[in-house]
Image (cartoon, rainbow, N blue to C red):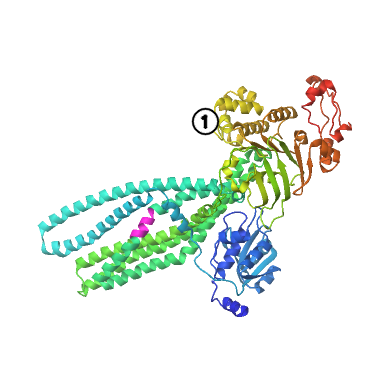
Amino acid sequence: MRKNRTELFAHGKFIRRRVPVRQQLNAVECGAACLAMILSYFGRDTSVAECREACMPGRDGLTARAIRNAARSFGLLVKAYSAEPEALNRLPLPLIAHWEFNHFVVVEKWSGDSVFIVDPRNGRRKLRSEEFDNSFTGVVLSFEPEERFERRGGRPRPWVSYIKKISESSGFVPVLFQILAASMLLQLFGLLLPAFTKVIVDHVLAFQIHNTLKVLGAGMLMFTVAQLIVSYLRSMLMIRLRSKLDTHLTLSFFDHLLKLPLSFFQQRMSGDLLMRLGSNSVIRELLTNQSISIILDGSFVIVYLFVILMVQPVFGWVVLALGALQAVVALLTRSQIRDLAQRELESKSEEQSYLVEAMKGVAILKSYGAEEKAFQQWSNLFFKQMNVSIERSYFSALIDTVLGGLRTFSPLVLIWVGALQVLDGNMSLGTVLAVSTLAASFLTPVNTLVSTVHQLQMVGANLDRVSDVLNTEPEQAGQETRQAPRLTGSIEVRNVSFQYDPNSPVVLRDITFAIEPGQKVALVGPTGSGKSTLAMLLLGLYQDVKGEILYDQIPLRKMNFRSMRNQFGIVSQDTFLFSGSIRKNISLMNPDMPLDALVEASRLAGIHEEICSMPMGYETLVGEGGSTLSGGQRQRVAIARALAHKPSILLLDEATSHLDAKTETRVDRNLSGLFCTRVVIAHRLSTIRNADLILVLNEGRIIEQGRHHSLMAKRGYYARLVETQLEKEEPAPILNEPFGNRAAGHYRDLSGDPSIHTGALSIPPASQASAKTMIQG
């Protein structure tokens, strides 16, 4: 049975002749987009989003194995081959080919020395065999429908959900109906012109009726004034509608964007998301300017055609044929217009994203003297975008030329047909002029509809990108949650395991521990052991977690994340400050925070005196990302921000890595005086000696836990970490000696002290006070 079904597919009874293009919408879903093309080719019209859910690409992308497993779930028989390029034309097409070691493309067909591929990033491409060979890695997947494969059409269209989103705008529907009423009135006014023409030519001029001409003149004047008034009112309503839509679409889009999970942003570039925000204006422009025309022109085209056919059938069929020619041109070119529009948006997104990156990393570029290379890379992306834009413009110009020729040809044909009818005595001159006016009234909206079809293709490419955001579920969507109570700081983690996606390695394995309110708990371990990932899980930033995390015995998944996170103070290893004043950054959680609270938080963070020494104090502007401050100042402002709203739990991920030992010790002492739970991630182990609990992670597991002294006594992994770090550190200065002596090289070398290895460092009484600021073990 499967063989017969496969033969039917092979003979084109269930498949398309060309592979339909599906564009990837982020950097890691090229494999999902290729699978969507394969499924659609075999008759199952599939979106990239549906394949993304089946493939579940993580932050590192997809493997061929993941694509194979997803394809099998749809009912495809999949075979993987390692083959040379010349052998591919013997395999059943289309294929998914591994490309440049970091990408997937669909091989559509071979023709002589040319290979036709569909790139989910760049659309259809025709390559020479040598070009294909240079990028092909040798791995392909072939596909064949099995008996259980289900053919279907009509994948969900983004227009439906987007229009539903628009209809939620308050006042949208009444304004729309008012615009439709005004537009319909204007169209009805348009029907009066042929009537005036016929009466004047066939009656007034033919019979020299002067009085009737005066009445008609007065009527035409009233008609013109009424038309101007209605047209003005319609324009005012259109402006009102635009402002409503702009406000609603932009605000709701950005609000929805901020509610999306962190993984969404990790898979997309900031420049691309900015472009998607701007795409709302492009879509709104079409909806406000063209949607009314589509509704009215579409309906009045039918009315005009019906009237012409009733008055003069010959004229009607000629007009219908001329309109059909324009419609055929639009239908034949719409897919190519859409492909080019998608390619242009993709290339523009790449160029914009790199531009944003370059501006953010301009200090690094200048430090390495790499400005020229950055400019070269950006200019390559810019010219790539320009080439696609020019290609689309050339194609649009060709279509416009053809349609322009038809528009020029149409009235000539109508005059010729009308002249024949008059000469044959079938029509009067007035009737010819009236019908010609009606024909023009028919063909003009047809022209508009054809242009709108092309604009819809370009807007459709924008809509795909916007819908990728709007169709992504926000955090905790559909979950029953409750507002978090005031947390005491009690945390319990039970058997937690985590991996970023089903195809990636497990990052955390069976993590279990408990934290009492007010405790300081440290997470230590080598780079890549899972410390920062565990911190992310505590915040609920990753949700596909096995096991359970509880706050005050309440499961995290049952709490509203935002109300829970509001009770955290967080300083991440990548300290980020917003452009604006220091006051604005510290009072981020509460813009109306009194100055006393700001000062208290700044004193605890050890930054108050430095802020006061600045000319503008707390109103000092920090620049984008805090660029005008030093690394240590940025970290302390971030610590002040975390403390300002009096959190129940502090999460510090390398929060003092840019501070000197003395400042770090002072900040740690200040934090120790607060009654709040502290979860500290640190590579500098001196910062966590006084922790109530130290969790040692390695390869995603807790391999040791306890206090500093007990862990040192075990002589295990933690002790080796401490010893290794002490060996790398310079000898410690005797901090109670005058600066001049230390500068002259008077140091006390403690590296050989055996007490270091037990964690019980002996300090002479005279040095005990100052030794609190030492950085050793």
Residue 693 in the image, given as x and y percentages of width and height: 75, 38
Magenta segment boundaries in residue numbering: 289-296
Res 116 visible: yes
Residue 716 in the image, given as x and y percentages of width and height: 84, 43
Q: Secondary structure at mark 1?
A: loop
Nearer to us in this view, 21 or 173: 173
If the image is split into quadrants, where does the C terminus sit?
Answer: top right
Note whether 757 is above or below 544 in the view shown. Answer: above
Residue 9 in the image, given as x and y percentages of width and height: 57, 76
Q: Quadrant of residue 527?
A: top right
Give left or right: position of 33 versus 446: right
Q: Is residue 290 magenta?
A: yes
List the residue tagged with mark 1.
592
Q: Main secondary structure of the magenta part?
A: helix
Q: Count neighbours of disc 1 (C-alpha within 10 A) and say few if under 14, some if 14 to 19, many if 20 or more.
A: few
Residue drawn at x 67%, y 30% as measured from the top left: 674
Give left or right: position of 185 versus 275: left
Res 83 visible: no
Give left or right: position of 327 versus 126: left
Nearer to us in this view, 313 or 597: 597
Q: Quadrant of residue 711?
A: top right
Note whether 79 is above or below 371 in the view shown. Answer: below
Q: Is residue 67 magenta?
A: no
Three-letter code for the amino acid on which mark 1 is drawn: Asp
